[in-house]
Amino acid sequence: MKKFILLSCIVLLVLGHNGYAQEKGSVLITNGTVITITDGTKENTDVLIEEGIITEIREGIEAPDGVETIDASGKYVMPGIVDAHSHIAAEDVNEWTHPVTAEVSMEESIDPNDINMYWALAGGVTSIHLMHGSANVIGGQNETLKLRYGADMDALRFDGAPRTIKFALGENPTRVHGQNFNVQPRTRMGVEQVIRDHFEEALDYKRNRQQYLEAKEAYESGNRDNPPVPVARNARMEVLVDILEGEIWVHCHSYRADEIMMLMRVFDDYGIENYTFQHANEAYKIAPELRKNNAYTSVFSDWWAYKFEVYYSTAYNASILNENGVKNSINSDSGELIRHLNHEAAKTVHYGETSKEDALKMITINPAEQLGIDDKVGSIEEGKHGDVAIWSGHPLSIYSIAEKTFVDGKKYFDREEDPDDMRVKIDPETDYDEASRRWYEESGRHGDSCLRGAEIRFNENGMEL
């Protein structure tokens, strides 16, 4: 009986391990036009991926035994797209019950069954930044994922990605907390003060907690007569301390130039250096200041005017930021836009005459750098992960589509093998108006908005009491 129990435990351990395993694959892609992002574009070039890692990039590579070869003649091979702002694959988005909820994490809110991941793979996307919502001034921690669709929630996580957290400025936190509730913040002034007050509280907590732990150690080792008054561990304060010490990177929902300037002043006062302004529709107004502060931006290509604080924007935003040396990315914040981020990047070429090379950086290496994963993905380089997509033509062409998408060398999307029940609409004859409405309601702006989950505080007249 003991042997049976021991054997069962071993089997369960093995199965459990496999359940968390991140599968890797090997493949040789030949004769493609390889857009490396960091080392130019190479024609008639092969890319060998072995056990999830790019091992060779050159002409005439022989396939190792057992490795599948895919002929990419006439096609383009590009690194997988990285979306720096996404809410797909999320069970919940907003823990909106307090202006500061730094202790919660999207790590516990991953939906591994969300088919939006598969649809994103069909657009050449391989990694996303799963973000908390924008209902709070300091919201929850985010999670960087690889789109290993079909894997469990643990296997979706991007190993080695730095910790990040969501901040939010402007109308969203003031509307959710201040309007009709008399809870700070009600104004942009209040938003700033919430941040400063909590940073000061975190510094006090760090000092008091450290003094307590040192006194406790002294008491337990006999170097102190009386036990100290305990200072309990506070999960929220611990996270805020980590932000102040640079262990957690900030990604901040923002629109207006004045509020972006405000947060840069606050961060400068507290020595916080690594941060990205998400949306940042008015960032073009202060591009030199952003560059001076080494701030990153992650913007929509031409999406604005959907609420009052987003009226002042321009389709030249990304190009102006790029011209001023600001490291900028194009994000989706949408289960619909994420399927064609290549076209969103192409708009910077159309509107602002940004070079094609820089436009592609905005959906590959730039977002990877903003997430701290650029040493692993975002370009096709030897030693990096085998996250690549094969495109029918140049990825910035309106006529091009992703044909195959690989994560860690394993194929997760193949247009030739695309089953009917994985498509946006099973019946291609469905009325367009009905299909587009479904997208908008289930997967578009409403379905994946930064305020998802906070709607409970709204009614037809505005806020609920």
Image (cartoon, grey):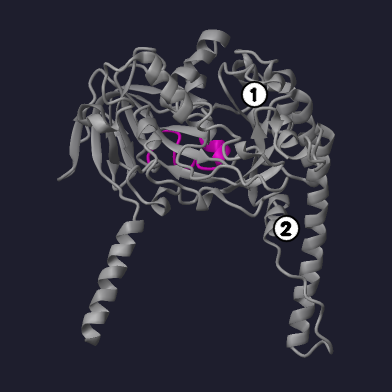
Measured as percent of width and height from the top left, residue 216 is found at 76, 80
Q: Which residue is mark 2?
A: 237
Query: Going 51% across and 37% down the picture, which residue do you hit?
Result: 87
**Rounded to the nearest whole Å, what is the CA distance between mark 2 and mark 1?**
35 Å
Q: Which residues are magenta?
A: 368-382
Q: Which residue is mark 1?
A: 325
Query: Viewed as shown, does residue 145 lie left or right of 251?
Result: left
Front residue (pair 99, 361): 99
Q: The C terminus appears in which quarter of the rendering?
A: top right
Amino acid marked by disc 2: Met
- Work out whether mark 2 precedes mark 1 in sequence or the reverse, and give the earlier one: 2
Q: The N terminus appears in which quarter of the rendering?
A: bottom left
* Magenta stretch: helix, strand or loop mostly: loop
Measured as percent of width and height from the top left, residue 346 is found at 47, 15
Front residue (pair 137, 378): 137
Front residue (pair 158, 326): 158
